[in-house]
Image (spheres, rainbow, N blue to C red):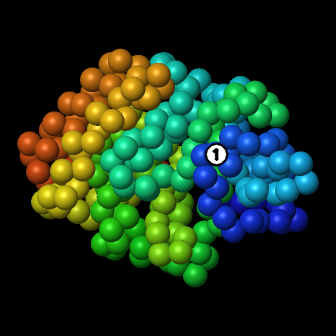
């Protein structure tokens, strides 16, 4: 991902309340993204609150295999589920109006450039372990190294627009725990999924809700991280 060289970056993770305030000022576009992904800031009067990623639904390309809802709704659903589970692996994200209409607005993460993200992604950081299980739960079809965001000892994940499909489509670069036991505390966290259902039911299709619950039960009963499937590509391309 790249942002305009002249844009001033505010190193701050915005809260949901801050994301909902003020006006979004767009200053550039992440040109590598396949859908409209805009970089900007939020201001209240003259006060700069921080930087954001804004993905208006008007800039989404229709996907034949994701006919329900919008990519923006899926991004928000991923955040809401991460929060309900207590994992905090997705930056604050919400749906709101902006310069190009309703879209997903997410706090920009000013990543630690000194971190080798491939090395971190293949390690055993607690956030990576959570993210491996999170991706299996939301059926993430596009977990790339470039979607991992290290900041202040944490690792967040972004780009969750192609998730929650009812058919198994897990594609990720994070397969190094495949077949290993899932930590008991993370399995216990899955009990909190119901806390997110009232919100998820407004964001994703009922068939996808049912599939989410089925994946949760499969992970709990199996007790191990998933294995790559022989039925579809297990790693997204390119991996960054």
Q: Quadrant of residue 58?
A: top right
Residue in the image at 62% along x and 33% along y: 95
Let me know if residue 163 appears in the view. yes
Q: Secondary structure at mark 1?
A: helix
Residue at image point 64% right, 55% down: 14
Tell me what residue is drawn at x 32 percent, y 58 percent.
130
Identify the residue shown where x is 19% and y is 58%. 185
**Against 26, is 153 above or below?**
below
Residue 60 screen position, x and y as percent: 65, 30
Quadrant of the image occupied by residue 71: top right
Residue behind mark 1: 17
**Name of the residue lying farthest toward the right:** 46
Q: Position of residue 198 (x, y in %)?
A: 39, 26
* Residue 35, visible in the rendered structure: no
Instruction: Residue 63: give x, y in percent of width and height.
Output: 53, 25
- In the picture, which quadrant includes the N terminus? bottom right
């Amino acid at each position: 991902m790249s942002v305009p060289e002249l844009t001033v970056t505010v190193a701050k993770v915005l809260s949901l309340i801050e994301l909902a305030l003020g006006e979004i000022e767009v200053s550039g576009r992440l040109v590598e993204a396949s859908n409209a992904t805009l970089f900007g800031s939020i201001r209240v009067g003259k006060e700069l609150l921080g930087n954001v990623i804004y993905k208006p639904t008007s800039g989404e390309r229709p996907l034949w295999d994701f006919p329900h809802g919008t990519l923006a709704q899926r991004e928000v659903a991923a955040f809401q589920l991460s929060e309900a589970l207590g994992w905090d692996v997705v930056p604050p994200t919400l749906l709101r109006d902006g310069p190009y209409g309703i879209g997903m607005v997410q706090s920009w993460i000013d990543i630690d450039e000194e971190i080798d993200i491939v090395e971190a992604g293949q390690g055993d950081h607690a956030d990576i372990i959570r993210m491996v299980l999170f991706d299996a739960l939301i059926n993430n079809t596009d977990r790339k190294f470039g979607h991992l965001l290290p900041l202040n000892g944490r690792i967040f994940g972004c780009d969750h627009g192609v998730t929650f499909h009812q058919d198994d489509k897990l594609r990720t670069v994070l397969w190094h725990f495949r077949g290993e036991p899932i930590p008991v505390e993370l399995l216990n966290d899955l009990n909190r999924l119901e806390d997110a259902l009232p919100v998820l039911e407004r964001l994703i299709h009922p068939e996808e809700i049912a599939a989410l619950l089925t994946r949760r039960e499969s992970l709990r009963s199996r007790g191990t991280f998933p294995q790559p499937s022989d039925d579809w590509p297990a790693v997204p391309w390119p991996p960054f």
